Amino acid sequence: MSLSRRDFIKLSIASATAASIGLSLPKQAESKEIVDKWVKGTCRFCGTGCGVYVGVKDGKVVAIKGNPDAKTNFGFLCIKGFLAYKCMYHPDRLKYPMIRQKNGRFKKVSWDEALDYVVKKFKYYHKKYGKDSVAYYGSGQCTTEESYTFNKLWKGGFRSNMVEGNPRLCMASAVGGYITTFGSDEPVGSYADIESAKCIFLVGSNTSECHPIIFRRIMRHKMRNPEVKVIVCEPRKTNTAKIADLWLPVDPGTDLAIFHSMAREIIKNNWHDKKFIDEHTRITDGKNVYTFDKYVEFLEQFTPETVEKLSRCPAENIRKAAKWFATSGASMTLWTMGLNQRTRGVWANNLIHNLHLITGNICKPGADSFSLTGQPNACGGVRETGSLAHLLPGTKPVKNKKWRTHVEKVWGLKPGTIDPKPGFHTIKMFGALGGEKDPNKPIKAMLTSTTNPAQSLPNLNKYIKGMKDAFLVVLDIFPTKTTQLADVVLPAAFLYEKGGVFGCSERRSQLTEKAVNPPGEAKADIWIAAQIAKRMGFEKLIPWNMDDSMKANEMAWTDYITVTKDTDHSLWGATYDRLKKEKAGIQWPCPYPGHPGTYKRYVRGMDPMFEHEEFKKFFGKKIPKDAKIYFYMDKKGEGKANIWLRPYKGPAEVPDAEYPFYLTTGRVIAHWHTGTMTMRIPEIARSYPYAYVEIHPDDAKKYNIFEGDLVEIVSRRGKAILPARITKNSLPGILFVPWFDQEISRMINFVCNDAVDPGSKEPEFKIAAVKIRKHTGATKLTEKVIISDINSNYY
Ligand code: SF4
């Protein structure tokens, strides 16, 4: 199906603005293409988890339309979901395995040759440098079956916990926040709470552009119920902030003080829920338990006036936000990277949960503390399968002996096989990656799947050499900045060419059926993982090595739901057969066949784990018969959630005389991550051909910068040069740059900070101190840049 420029502009405008003003996306967004069949699936371009139907004609995908039965999107799609299939047939698709030769150029090889070579190298490094010298770096865009398989291969086969994934860069702080407050990862409630909420608090989330279909739900609810209040807290006056009833402008990283100040106002005005606090919470700093009076005393320092001076958020706005939040009757907070990608991301998450706990705005319809996940399968694929260096399936730590023993038993391994020591988190892992000549770099080889770290890591200058020097195997569908550094490139299948399960922000697992075959010799990642396992001698561990990807997926899924059967994340009732039939997927916990899935956790009558004897026995939960609410945090059988007494701490870097600006980065509505797919959708590439820097008019004037001028943005780590977009969207002193652009001089991640949160190890992408100057070199702008040549150089 071709889309004229006029149609595209109409649809993009509809997509962006319909979401902003709460209109339904136009039904013409559904393709009128005549197809041979429609195949059920999920969109792969954000964590909303929109259900789709993929239209197939003559063995090719020719259209996508929304699934009207999906509980996430009710048939509506944004422009990315609607046009996603277009990148599948781009001429740059990788179709054959390739090995880099001594002359630096890639040579097309057979699969056997490529896999034998990879395994020979892995075996060599294992023998010479030990089991942890070969790492896996995956993605929140892999299917659950793929993440599970690679995780099992590494932790159960190689006996190494050097397993990470890009969700460490986006969601780790949310995981830390949920676990330290409630005792279990992922939200209490569901998207359905949006339609019951009376106050919606959006924090660090440009929802209208990054989760357009969620924003559509919010605005539709607001339009039908004008009394519903929407509050937005973030540094930029985004399209999301423009429609809010109240905007809390804030200097990056200072919102912790705002949350404490709101808590102070709430308690001072007696808007808190004393009964809920007494019955269901404990006030702690992690070492000691405190009285409520002590908490009140702690909050005293955060007067709205003091916080205004620190954050630039007017005291009056803080007071109003506190009142609306506490007195609405049902308040829901939604957040994403603005809260997570910080050196105090876990604390920021804790303080949002605090607001819900002190007002009793949790465990009831319309009241929830809800993390919107960025990627389509960060939750289901990486968090739930435990595909991170410190976790095992079920989001349980590798350090937990009892759980390790359980996993070893189900996987048929000898006791003691799984290493109790966590591997390296992402930033440490890439810091430790290097060639054989570098004795300080213990990781000598890495396999990456469905991600592009050579563009997406922060402080890129620090990590490029390591990727280049190490033995790097890259699975992807297109040439990228990372394939430019690779030794072996393995062509992967697109989601609709292999099928599999994706989770989403609301604990919902949905199955995508395979619709068409991949091009050339491209293969599903799960097949590649299983072939490596076979050659490494782990065939028994990963027996799903057949060519039929849906059969392999089903075997992997069954294995996964078996090992996590009695956890609070149980999907035991969500068999593959059932997922195939379900039109809207299933929300965990779903602990037995026929269970409908769970809308809200920790509430008797809704959370099935209250009655699940094996879960309670294994994890020591003594849920009293009369407990209506019980959080999983508690070791003493009280079922209480933690209200955290966290001191104020600002970002790792704040502006100073030399670097006087804050830099913050993010997405735009049309593009996905590093643009490798969306830049290959012609309509999208035309509408957003390059990145830019948003700068306030006062700052532009001071630096004699005019619209379109090239601006150098320099941090202590690196530099980028981008055209100026002069706008009052940001506060003076704050710059914003989207990060999708592959043109090397516009890659803003060279500038970003790689300082990590001490708890979650998530880097502070969102905040860096920078200086700017008008660029005086060549001023011609290279518009659309796509890395098409597999033999091109990184620099
Ligand atoms: S909102 Fe997200 S999941 Fe839904 S269509 Fe858009 S990109 Fe896809």
Image: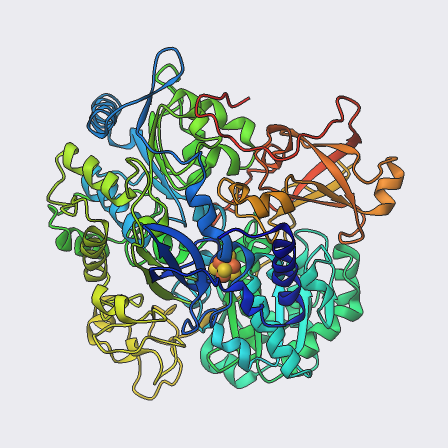
Where is residue 92 shown, x and y percent of the image? Answer: 44, 34
Count how many numbered circles sit on residues in the image: 0
Judge left or right: residue 144 versus residue 66.
left
- Colour scheme: rainbow
Judge left or right: residue 563 versus residue 329.
left
The residue sitting at 52% across, 54% down in the picture is 80
**In the rendered view of the protein, which quadrant contains the C terminus?**
top right
Residue extending farthest to the top is 103
Q: Nearer the viewer, residue 552 or 380?
A: 552
Q: Nearer the viewer, residue 8 or 456?
A: 8
Where is residue 631 shown, x and y percent of the image? Answer: 39, 73
Judge left or right: residue 555 versus residue 232.
left
Judge left or right: residue 771 versus residue 220.
right
The residue sitting at 10% across, 45% down in the picture is 414
Residue 157 appears in which quarter of the rendering?
top left
Where is residue 610 shown, x and y percent of the image? Answer: 29, 79
Residue 83 visible at all: yes
Position of 433 relative to 633 (above/below): above
Q: Nearer the viewer, residue 152 or 670?
A: 670
The residue sitting at 39% across, 24% down in the picture is 441
Where is residue 194 shown, x and y percent of the image? Answer: 54, 75
Residue 771 appears in which quarter of the rendering?
top right
Q: Nearer the viewer, residue 93 or 127?
A: 93
